[in-house]
Image (cartoon, rainbow, N blue to C red):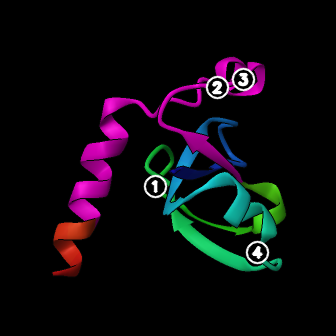
């Protein structure tokens, strides 16, 4: 299981979408469209599933290690704030 990530089109940084999935399930889902509030530039980004990837909790391959797939601590606090606001 891991966090579905996209790249911020404004800054080029990897950002979490708030979706948790396992790689095989995510890769087998039909193409879908979604939006996410970017914690880096504070803009809502629109994205397609084909533009996203699953970032496992621990980097398991060269692509994940190269992109710094392991979320930074501030992502967790951003996610916690979003969850609290929905309650």
User: Would you name the residue on which mark 4 appears?
Assistant: 29
Is 73 situated left or right of 12 in this image?
left
Crowding at mark 1 (Cα within 10 Å: few <14, some 14-19, many 20+)? few
Q: CA distance from mark 1 to mark 3?
A: 30 Å
Marks 1 and 2: which is nearer the front? 2
Residue 52, magenta (yes or no): no
Is 73 situated left or right of 68 in this image?
left
Is 56 situated left or right of 60 in this image?
left
Where, by quadrant of the figure, is residue 25 drawn? bottom right
- What segment carries the magenta color? 53-82
Where, by quadrant of the figure, is residue 74 drawn? top left
Q: CA distance from mark 1 to mark 2?
A: 30 Å
Q: Earlier in the sequence, mark 1 or mark 3?
A: 1
User: Would you name the residue on which mark 3 appears?
Assistant: 61
| Residue contact at pointers 1 and 2, CB within 8 angstroms | no
Q: Residue at x 50, y 28 (%)?
A: 58
Q: Which quadrant holds the C terminus?
A: bottom left
Q: Is residue 37 above or below residue 58?
A: below
Q: Residue at x 65, y 19 (%)?
A: 65
Q: Earlier in the sequence, mark 1 or mark 4?
A: 4
Residue 16 is situated, as x and y percent measured from the top left of the image, at 52, 50
Marks 1 and 3: which is nearer the front? 3
Q: Residue at x 40, y 30 (%)?
A: 72
User: Would you name the residue on which mark 2 appears?
Assistant: 60
Marks 1 and 4: which is nearer the front? 4
Q: Earlier in the sequence, mark 4 or mark 2?
A: 4
Residue 39 is situated, as x and y percent measured from the top left of the image, at 43, 49
Numbered marks: total: 4
């Amino acid at each position: 299981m891991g966090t579905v990530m996209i790249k911020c089109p404004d800054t080029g940084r990897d950002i979490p979408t708030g979706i948790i999935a396992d790689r095989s399930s995510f890769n087998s889902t039909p193409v879908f469209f979604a939006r996410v509030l970017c914690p880096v530039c504070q803009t809502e980004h629109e994205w397609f599933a084909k533009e996203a990837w699953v970032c496992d909790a621990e980097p398991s391959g060269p692509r994940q290690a190269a992109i710094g797939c392991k979320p930074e601590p501030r992502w967790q606090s951003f996610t916690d704030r979003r969850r609290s606001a929905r309650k």
